[in-house]
Image: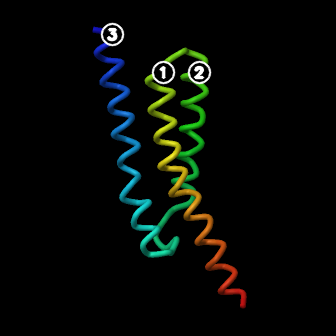
Amino acid sequence: MKEIVAILFGLGLGGNALLFVPQIIAVWRKKSDEGISLITFGGFSILQVIGIVHGCLQGDWSLILGMSASLITCGSVTALTIYYRIRRLQADAI
């Protein structure tokens, strides 16, 4: 039973990572940070790093892999938001 729950947990974390993909696509297509909360996505990214560290300390591969996948996708939203925000602020300064 413990293994089944671990597998479902890992799949759930993988699904969580996929939930960020539409946001990546939206930011990429709009080429804008408009409507994206950097605090929210930055906070998610920090929590995912903490989850990865916790998974490493516990030896929990489901947690490590799931949080790593989430960090990649959420981190992509965060990075794109930072990139487009800097670009927008530079354009506004001109």
Residue 65 percent across, percent down from the top left: 48, 30
Residue type at tag 2: Cys
Q: In this view, does 17 lie to the left or right of 68?
A: left
Name the residue at the top extreme.
1
Residue type at tag 1: Trp
| Residue to which mark 1 is pinned | 61
Residue 3 percent across, percent down from the top left: 33, 12
| Disc 3 to disc 2, C-alpha distance | 19 Å
Residue under the image location 51 percent in, 74 percent down:
32
Residue type at tag 3: Lys
Which of the 4 image quadrants contains residue 1?
top left
Q: In this view, does 41 lie above or below 85?
A: above
Q: Is residue 79 left or right of residue 28?
A: right
Please tell me how crowded label 2 is: few (under 14), some (14-19), or many (20+) other residues with Cα within 10 Å. Answer: few
Q: In this view, does 18 lie above or below 24?
A: above
| Residue to which mark 2 is pinned | 56
- Label 3, secondary structure: give it: helix
Q: Give the mark, 3 or 2, whose residue is nearer the N terminus.
A: 3
Residue under the image location 42 percent in, 72 percent down:
29
Residue under the image location 66 percent in, 86 percent down:
92
Asked if the residues shown at circle 3 and circle 2 are in contact, with their CB atoms under 8 angstroms apart, the answer is no
Name the image quarter holding the C terminus. bottom right
